[in-house]
C-alpha cells in the first residue's frame, strides 16, 4: 500500500509527537479524509523518512506520532543544477515540479533579457517561497526525501559571474555541433535554459565565456518548458538513475 507522504520543515525524531503544518493538515483531513490512527510517512528534508500515524485530529490541527526512521533515499547520482530563466504564466510551476520528479538537485531562477515575467523585491521573494513549496509537494508525490533548494531570484548576468565549482556547464542550442551523448560523463552539471525565445546572442556569448558548452538534443526547437525537462531526462538516461532502473 502506498502511504501518503508529507513534508515537515521542523526536525523530526523517532518517538516524537508533532503537529503537522497547516497546509499538510488541511490536505490530510479535508482532501484525503484520513482518520485518527491512519498511517503515513513524514520527512523533514534532512534525509530518510519516518513511519507515523495520526494520533488525533482537532478541527484543522492534526497531531502525529512518529515511529522508526527509515534510511530510504531516492536521489539521483547526478548533481544537476537547473538554471532556468523566468517563464510566463504557470510554466515555472510546471517546470519546477517536473524537474524535481526528474531528480534535479537545485533550481536557480534567473531573469534573462527575453523573460516575459518580471519580478523584484517582496513579490520576487513570495514567488520563490511559492516555488519552494512546489518543490516540496513534488517530493511528497515522487518519493524523494531531500527537497531541492530553489535559490533566490537574480539576474542571469550576475549569476554567470559566479564560479563553476568544477561543474560541467551546458546550454541547449538546436544548431550546436555537439550532442549530449558525445560529452564525457560528468557527475556535477549546471544546465542553463532560456525563457520564451531562448537566450539572446549576448547572453549566449557571456555564458560561453564562463564555460557553458552548447549542445543539441535533436533537430527540433523545444519550448522553454520542454527544453530543460527533456535535457534532464536525457542526462538521467545517459549518466543517472534512468540507466540503472
Image (spheres, rainbow, N blue to C red):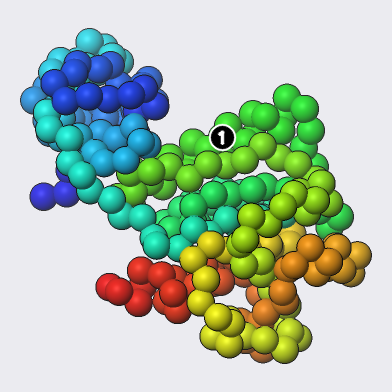
- Residue 122: give x, y in percent of width and height: 73, 24
Q: Quadrant of the C terminus?
A: bottom left
Extreme residue in the front direction: 166
Identity of the residue drawn at 68% across and 62% down? 192
**Would residue 73 be visible to someone looking at this image?**
yes
Number of other residues with Cα within 10 Å of mark 1, as a class: few under 14, some 14 to 19, many 20 or more:
some
Quarter location, residue 168: bottom right
Looking at the image, which residue is at 66% across and 37% down?
152
Q: Which residue is pictured at 74% across the width and 84% down the height? A: 176
Q: Left or right of 223: which side holds 205? A: right
Residue 12 appears left or right of 156: left
Question: Which residue reaches farthest left?
Answer: 37
Above or below, 91 relative to 63: below
Query: Which corner quadrant of the image does residue 243 belong to?
Result: bottom left
Outermost residue on the right side: it is 202
Classify residue 47 as left or right of residue 52. right
Q: Who's the residue at 80% across and 69% down the image?
A: 208
**For this rendering, which residue is in front, 144 or 158?**
158
Residue designated by label 1: 130
Any part of residue 94 in sight: no
Q: Is residue 111 above or below residue 40?
A: below
Toward the top, the furthest residue is 58
Number of on-image labels: 1
Percent coordinates x, y for residue 148 in the rendering: 48, 45
Q: Secondary structure at mark 1?
A: helix
Q: Decide which of 81, 188 is in the foreground and name it.
A: 188
Instruction: Give residue 157's position: percent from left, percent from top.
Output: 83, 51
| Place of residue 46 in the rendered image (x, y in percent of width and height, measured from the top left) | 35, 36
Amino acid at each position: 500500500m502506498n502511504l501518503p507522504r508529507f513534508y515537515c520543515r521542523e526536525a523530526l525524531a523517532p518517538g516524537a509527537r508533532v503537529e503537522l503544518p497547516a497546509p499538510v493538515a488541511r490536505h490530510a483531513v479535508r482532501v484525503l479524509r484520513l482518520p485518527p490512527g491512519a498511517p503515513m510517512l513524514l520527512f523533514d528534508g534532512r534525509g530518510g523518512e519516518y513511519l507515523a500515524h495520526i494520533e488525533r485530529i482537532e478541527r484543522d490541527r492534526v497531531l502525529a506520532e512518529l515511529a522508526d526512521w527509515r534510511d530510504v533515499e531516492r536521489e539521483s547520482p547526478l548533481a544537476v543544477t537547473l538554471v532556468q530563466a523566468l517563464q510566463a504564466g504557470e510554466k515555472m510551476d510546471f517546470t519546477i515540479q517536473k524537474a524535481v520528479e526528474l531528480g534535479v538537485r537545485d533550481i536557480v531562477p534567473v531573469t534573462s533579457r527575453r523573460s516575459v515575467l518580471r519580478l523584484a523585491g517582496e513579490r520576487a521573494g513570495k514567488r520563490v517561497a511559492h516555488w519552494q513549496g512546489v518543490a516540496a509537494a513534488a517530493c511528497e508525490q515522487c518519493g524523494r526525501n531531500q527537497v531541492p533548494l530553489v535559490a533566490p531570484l537574480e539576474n542571469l548576468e550576475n549569476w554567470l559571474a559566479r564560479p563553476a565549482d568544477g561543474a560541467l556547464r551546458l546550454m541547449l542550442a538546436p544548431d550546436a555541433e555537439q550532442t549530449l551523448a558525445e560529452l564525457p560523463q560528468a557527475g556535477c552539471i549546471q544546465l542553463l535554459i532560456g525563457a520564451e525565445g531562448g537566450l539572446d546572442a549576448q547572453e549566449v556569448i557571456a555564458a560561453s565565456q564562463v564555460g557553458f558548452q552548447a549542445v543539441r538534443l535533436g533537430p527540433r526547437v523545444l519550448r522553454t518548458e520542454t527544453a530543460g525537462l527533456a535535457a534532464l531526462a536525457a542526462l538521467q538516461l545517459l549518466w543517472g538513475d534512468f540507466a540503472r532502473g
